[in-house]
Image (cartoon, rainbow, N blue to C red):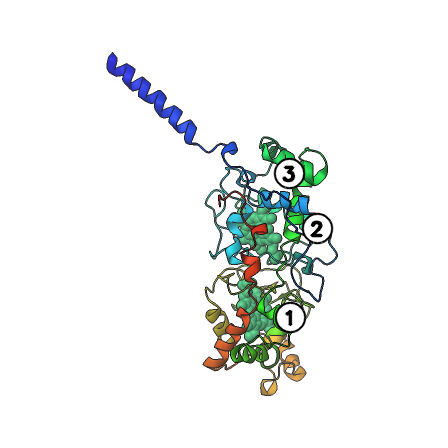
Amino acid sequence: MRKLVYIILAGIAFIVACTKESPTPESRNPILPATVSRYDSVAGDVPFDPWDGFQVDNHKATLGRVLFYETQLSKNNRVSCGSCHKQAFGFADNLAKSIGFDNGLTKRNSQAILNAGLQEFFFHDLREEHLENMVLMPIADHVEMGLENKDYMVAKLESLPYYRNLFLQAFGDESVTVERISDGLVHFIRSMISVNSKWDIGNGVGFSNFTQEELLGKNLYFIKFPCSSCHGGDNLMGGMSAAENVGLDNWYQDKGEPGLDPVLNVTKNGWFKVPSLRNVEVTGPFMHDGRFSTLEEVVEFYNSGIQRHPQLSFMLRRGNNGGFFDLAEFNEDIIPNQETGIHPLRMAMTQEEKQALIAFMKTFTDWGFLNDNRFSDPFIRP
Ligand code: HEC
Ligand code: HEC
């Protein structure tokens, strides 16, 4: 009898201990600066408008920061945006495929987040133009965060006391709505501006801050090889053509951007967003499926590995004498004989050139951005 009482008492003690240990929302308050951070300005003179006219509100961005790292926005409170978009990796993931709330793997490689104002389309297949819609998708996504019911999402945030003041500061009253959640996330994401790399500084001082190797790499990137025709402009990304087929494979399982190939008039296969190369030093693994883990592998792919895909970008086809824009050869390629008509560029890089290209791409890294407290996880104790 006495034994039984002990067992029951031990059982009760065990249950009490367990309930105590299960993380209650109250035990994880975000730690925010006493005065609101300035999300509406960047250090230094930037010769272009990285916000593209968008007026960032500091209080909305602050709310967005908390939401970005809010695990309660996932079905089982395990995953936040920040789980797959990690600051140290340029807000990309260091895994080829990211792990969702229920341990499922994402279909594609998580993308870096930066300079959203300079981007027209989001996702590897460009499927979304409006950040306002985009930011709520991962929350409802079955693999990523799994919280489909919007009313439940609102109710969950309403039950967390620290949101009252955040919503009040951002919108003038405490009420939580789906639109306001989206708005907060949009203001935070639009404030994630990365314009202070060695490359940006070099642009202002005639590249006097560059090493010989970096200068060589810059020449290769802009002149000898066609890199800048795709990864160019202020944001080192696709301008005229936002998606391209780079010939990773002869046929792509993941079709990428939908629509018709403008030349062949067949369904597009293997066209993916031309990513910004800002912070590329830390955003690996690379490509939409994370197939390359190092920049060395990416460069070797461009050097010798481009496949004869019938829809291969013209910028990666061989022209005469190493010229990249020889129309005669392009016309030959357009002829329906898709098997033999494609001549992928073979760049024949020397070892020195490969290394210089990589050294140059590393000047795109913005260490200030990667270490900026305004973008860090507020739930982590300092
Ligand atoms: C489980 C991992 C995961 C989580 C959680 C996640 N993402 Fe993503 N994110 C991805 C992947 C993978 C892609 C690329 C998807 C694709 O192209 O199909 C992506 C793409 C994006 C992009 C597009 C970037 C570009 O340049 O086109 C943005 C912006 C983004 N996510 C923001 C968010 C926000 C905001 C949240 C939280 C509400 C979030 N993500 C949660 C994995 C995740
Ligand atoms: C025809 C346009 C085009 C040209 C030219 C081009 N790229 Fe790319 N690049 C792309 C596309 C598209 C992707 C993404 C492919 C994917 O996701 O599967 C990419 C991806 C990359 C990546 C990986 C980025 C990431 O975040 O995953 C690097 C690095 C890169 N390119 C460097 C270069 C270099 C260096 C050159 C010149 C030797 C070059 N590119 C030439 C279109 C191009």
For this orientation, the residue located farthest to the right is 53
Type of amino acid under label 3: Leu
Q: Point out residue 90 in the picture as x, y percentages from the top left corner.
A: 54, 58
Going from N to C along the chain, the mark reached first, 3 or 2, is: 2
Residue closer to the observer: 255 or 338? 255
Q: Point out residue 249 in the picture as x, y percentages from the top left corner.
A: 51, 68
Type of amino acid under label 1: Gly
Quarter of the image where one finds residue 119:
bottom right
What kind of element bears circle 1?
loop
Determine the CA span between mark 2 and mark 1. Answer: 26 Å
| Residue highlighted by disc 2 | 56
Q: Is mark 3 within 8 Å of ligand 1?
A: no
Residue closer to the observer: 182 or 20? 20
| Above/below status of 13 relative to 106 | above
Q: Which residue is painted at 68% across and 33% down in the image?
A: 174
From this viewpoint, is residue 360 visible?
A: yes
| Nearest-to-viewer mark from 1 and 3 | 3
Residue closer to the observer: 101 or 81? 81
| Above/below status of 32 relative to 236 | above
Type of amino acid under label 2: Val
Residue 232: which numbered mark, if any?
1
For this orientation, the residue located farthest to the front is 34
For this orientation, the residue located farthest to the top is 1
Going from N to C along the chain, the mark reached first, 2 or 1, is: 2
Q: In this view, does 79 lie to the left or right of 134?
A: left
- Dot 3 surroundings within 10 Å: few (below 14), some, or many (20 or more)? many
Residue 166: which numbered mark, if any?
3
Determine the CA span between mark 3 and mark 2. Answer: 16 Å
What kind of element bears circle 3?
helix
| Above/below status of 19 relative to 114 | above
Determine the CA span between mark 1 and mark 3. Answer: 38 Å
